[in-house]
Amino acid sequence: MTNTIQLRTYIEDQGVKLGHVANVLGISSNTLRKKLNNEQEFKVSEAEQLSALLRLTRDERDNCFFGPVH
């Protein structure tokens, strides 16, 4: 499951709009919302694209997508 709180913090800290995130990932805003709310899982390719967009380190990425959920 996605660590939604941490991921949303990174998105907000970068000043990136959710609509832009959805565009970059090639998904709708509704699908992004579902993924951020853990109703759907991020694909590995989406996690990589989002990590690159947010300039996350490997540890930050792993905490968001592969680590314990808070």
Image (cartoon, rainbow, N blue to C red):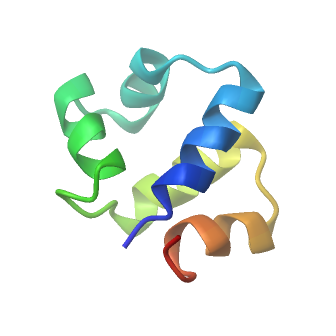
Determine whether 33 is above or below 57 in the image.
above
Q: Residue furthest front?
A: 70
Is residue 34 found left or right of 62 in the rendered image? left
Query: Which residue corresponds to the image point at 26% horizontal and 64% vertical from the top-left?
Result: 41
- Image quadrant in which the N terminus is located: bottom left
Determine whether 27 is above or below 5 in the image.
above
Is residue 8 found left or right of 40 in the rendered image? right
Query: Which residue corresponds to the image point at 53% horizontal and 70% vertical from the top-left?
Result: 70
**Where residue 13 appears, x then y in whole percent?**
75, 30
Is residue 35 found left or right of 24 in the rendered image? left
Determine whether 4 is above or below 31 in the image.
below
Q: Using the rendered view, name the quadrant where residue 12 is placed.
A: top right
**Where residue 39 appears, x then y in whole percent?**
17, 57
Query: Which residue corresponds to the image point at 76% horizontal and 53% vertical from the top-left?
Result: 56
**Where residue 44 appears, x then y in whole percent?**
42, 68
Say which of 51 and 8 sits in front. Answer: 8
Query: Which residue corresponds to the image point at 70% horizontal and 19% vertical from the top-left?
Result: 15
Determine whether 24 is above or below 53 in the image.
above
**Where residue 2 appears, x then y in whole percent?**
43, 65
For the image, the number of numbered tags is: 0
Say which of 65 and 45 sits in front. Answer: 65
